[in-house]
Every structure is written in C-alpha cells, then in structure tokens.
Amino acid sequence: MTDIAKQYAQIQARVATAAGKIGKRPEDITIVAVSKTQPLSAIEAAIAIGIQDFGENKPQELRDKVAYFEQPLNWHMIGNLQRNKIKYVLGHCGLIHSVDSIKLLDSLEQECQKRGVKVEVLLQINVSREQSKAGFYPEQIDQVLALAATLKHVQVKGLMTIPPYVEDPEQNRQYFSALHQIFVDIKMKNIDNIAMDYLSMGMTGDFEVAIEEGATHIRVGTGIFGTRQ
Ligand SMILES: *Cc1c(COP(=O)(O)O)cnc(C)c1O
C-alpha cells in the first residue's frame, strides 16, 4: 500500500468510529481530500484508491488540476475567492465552501446568469470570531439569507467554518456545536433557495469532534497526503 492509501484507510476508520458514536454511517460523511499544493501524482494516487472529492483553496490551481484530469471528480473550492477569480472556478467545481461576503454572492449570481449556469455554495461563518478569519458573523446571517433567497443561479446548500488551530480538538467543540445550532435554526425556517444539507467543518486535527457535532463534510489535507509542499 502507498502512504496515501494507508493514511486514507486510517482516516476512514476514524470517521467510521466518530460517525458511529452519533448513530451515523460512514457514508453519511463526505471526506474532502484537500489536495492544495500537492502534485498531480498525489491526486492520481488518491484517485487510484477511489477518492473522488478534492478540495483546493486557490482558484487557478483548482482550474489547472480540473483541466488535467479527464474523469469526472468532485472539486470543492475551500479558500478565499476574489470576485475577479470567479471565472476560474465556475463550471469547474461542484461546491464553493467559502462564500464570505454579500459582494461575492452578488458577483456569483451575475456571473452565473451571464453564463447560464448554476452553482451550489456554502456560507462561511466565523463562529470563533477571529479577526484573521473570513466569514460572516452569526448576527449577519439573516441579512445574507434574505439576499440569498432571491437568487436564481446561486443555491445555498449549507454552512462552513474554520475554527482556530488548537492542540486539543476539544477546544473547538464549542464552535462546531454553535454552527450546528445555527444550521438547524436556519433549516427550520424553510427559506426559499436555502437548503441546509451540508455542514462543512473539521480538518485533520479536529474532524472527529466536528463529526460528533454534526459535520456532513470534513476537509482533510495533511492527514491523507502528509505535509504540504
Ligand atoms: C488547508 C485546509 C484544510 C486542510 O487542513 P489539514 O489540517 O491539512 O487537514 C481544510 N480546510 C481549509 C479551508 C483549508 O484551507
């Protein structure tokens, strides 16, 4: 087995255990293999063992990697997306996890309309309120949802967060649990065009806690591929 195969098998086993604790099945959790900075050969090795979901945080890198692989894969945009770079990801990635401003939401709608395409997005929420982090603050969400409800080409599918880097993942449980509560509250409102299907939270260091708190998508880079280039 290659390192990637071994590491992925370990992550899958840990996902299954965490999911089992809350009565979910492993297949209820999508493991997004974060391939940013990784060479094409690493992605090839991942595809060979059946990985289909890849996450990238730079629009051009995502576009280039998508162009290289001919088979259909699920590409996830997980990093900051400037409005002038929307063109690199539209039509290439299935889900944008990182919509963090009203302006970006508006621009995505305009670009999609121009091209006659649709896009599914998650709203990035800054639950831990770190100054250095992107995302809407919880008190801004109602305003964002009011706008999102009117869009014709951009569909909100859920929420995403990036909590602080911590040594002890238990320290992030509060943020995962808070985001899950927001997710449930929005879902109960049944707003047009707002589906709360996906909750993207948890990385290599804290994905088990995130799953226990309701994550449907975890984003795992170093845990699968090893250290980044
Ligand atoms: C890099 C990155 C990850 C993966 O981080 P690891 O600690 O390597 O698992 C997850 N989410 C986002 C938004 C990232 O930028």
Image (cartoon, rainbow, N blue to C red):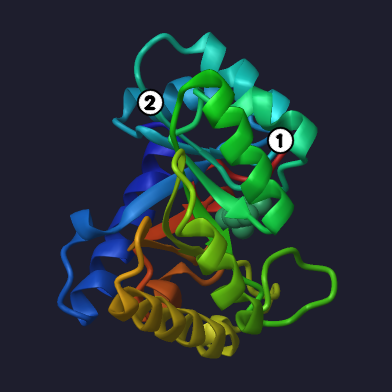
Q: Quadrant of residue 143?
A: bottom right
Q: Amino acid at mark 1?
A: Lys
Ligand 1 within 8 Å, label 1 CB:
no
Ligand 1 within 8 Å, label 2 CB:
no
Element assignment for label 1: loop
Q: Residue at x 64, y 74 (%)?
A: 163
Residue 131 screen position, x and y as percent:
84, 75
Say which quadrant the N terminus sits in: top left
Q: Residue furthest right?
A: 131
Tag 1 or tag 2, which sits nearer the N-term? 1
Q: Residue at x 36, y 13 (%)?
A: 71
Tell whether 91 sits left or right of 25.
right
Q: Amino acid at mark 2?
A: Leu
Seen from the viewer's position, the closer of residues 55 and 194 is: 194
Q: Is residue 161 above or below residue 154?
A: below
Residue 225 screen position, x and y as percent:
54, 41
Badge 1 density bin: few <14, some 14–19, many ≥20, Cα 10 Å: some
Q: Quadrant of residue 182?
A: bottom left
Tell whether 146 sits left or right of 105.
left
Circle 2 is placed at which residue position? 73
